[in-house]
Amino acid sequence: MKQLHLLFFFCLFYTVLLIPLPTADQLAYQQMELGAIIHFNMATVAGTQGCTRTEVPDPKIFNPTELNTDQWLESIVAFGAKYAVLVAKHNCGFCTWPTKVKFPEFGFSYDYSVNSSAYRGDIVSQFVASCKKYGVKPGFYYSVVTNSYLNVENGKVFGGKLVPGQVNVTQEQYDEIVLAQITELWTNNGPLLEIWFDGGYQQDIKEKLSALLLKLQPNAVAFNGYGVSVNPVRWIGTESGHAPYPTWSTGVSNGGDPNSTVWAPPECDMTMQRYDTWFYNAEVGIHTMAELLSIYHDSVGHNCNMLIDFAPQPNGLLPVDAVQRYKEFGDYIRNCYGKPLNSVSGTGATLILEFTSATTVNRVALQEDQSRGQRVRTYQVEGYVSDWVVLSSGSSIGNKKIDLFAHEITVTKLRFTAQSFVDTPIITLSAYNCATLL
């Protein structure tokens, strides 16, 4: 019997040790919940969704005469985002800052940027200044694996005949250019909240990327950063904004894995414009409020940060209809979830939220204290009328799980029960009754 007790406690201790924990930076990132990604680059003025190796638009066509990064940030704040990622360089290779990267040893100067355009301003530094002004954490997207200007696709330099505007470099030279430019971005613009590796990175610069991150931006989370960052964030596997359920904080792909030892919180990137349109297109229209709220409940409400696109027009300003929709969404979220009807936090498998009188509710939000790991594996929520009635159930909670009830119900108390868990649950249960859209 004594041996059985020892075995039991050993297994319990071993299980606790295996629960992965977030870094402080990953935890702070998840708690932000809403973010913005700004697509404003050469593709905006070229009228495309990004360049291929067969085209290098003339840099002189880039001339945003009304550019106003404060307008971007005002709209980002109205939406409710706490962090914003600027596409500093996309697939065309055009840099929205005056890059000074040169390599005299192989006769190279990077001449595809705002320096060679009709617009001579530094959009990156203006963006960072506006972020600071409006209290939003900045981040950068820099396409490591694609660069039309340098004839690069999937991280590989292609030989052969160049199209007008392209410059020939070797693979080794390209890798040095990438490292030099991200060094510029990560050195000259203060602490960054998030760094985006869209499409990943070349394996031959993996160690150097990791060292640069640790040296220059040790507190930044890195999208697609598993393997190079101590603060990886993973892609949810779709650009629709809808996360699958369950979505876990652990795992390295899609909805994650509750048994993984890797903490890599998910990010749900999506476009405000329809049809997966990232750069401004006047013809496609924007999402309705109903669509945005459905995405919110399937992203933030499924333990996934919601990262929505902001696509300025060629003149540098966000379109009026999008500005209005961002604010409409933000107003609804603040009115709905800004203050719960009642809330309770506690430790243990059962948590009861009591009301002073019968109260009508139509949803709850559940949150785990993830500083101690993601512990709950299955749960249910009940409401008390004249007896307990099951209102919702699920598996993953993480930073936040929002359960929308099938209909309004008037209760005197709510009960959360963790039916299975890997360590003692630490839970917050909040009740709401939000207006439905007309």
Image (cartoon, rainbow, N blue to C red):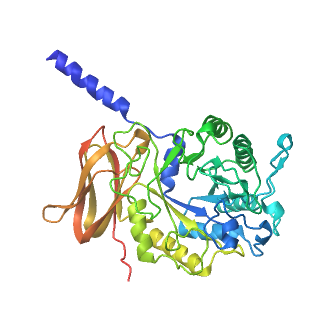
Quadrant (top left/top right/bottom left/bottom right) for the C terminus: bottom left
Left or right for 265, reference 69:
left
Residue 147 seen from this side: yes
Judge by depth and name the residue closer to the eye, 343 or 356: 343
Return the residue found at the far bottom: 438
What is the total number of numbered labels drawn onto the structure image? Answer: 0
Left or right for 370, reference 51:
left
Q: Where is residue 316, by image quadrant?
A: bottom right
Left or right for 354, reference 386:
right
Residue 416 seen from this side: no
Residue 428: give x, y in percent of width and height. 35, 52
Residue 419: give x, y in percent of width and height. 22, 46
Quadrant (top left/top right/bottom left/bottom right) for the N terminus: top left
Residue 178: give x, y in percent of width and height. 70, 46
Residue 358: give x, y in percent of width and height. 24, 68
Q: Where is residue 25, by image quadrant?
A: top right
The residue sitting at 25% across, 48% down in the picture is: 378
Q: Is residue 313 above or below residue 214?
A: below
The residue sitting at 46% across, 44% down in the picture is: 264
Return the residue found at the far front: 160
The residue sitting at 23% across, 70% down in the picture is: 410
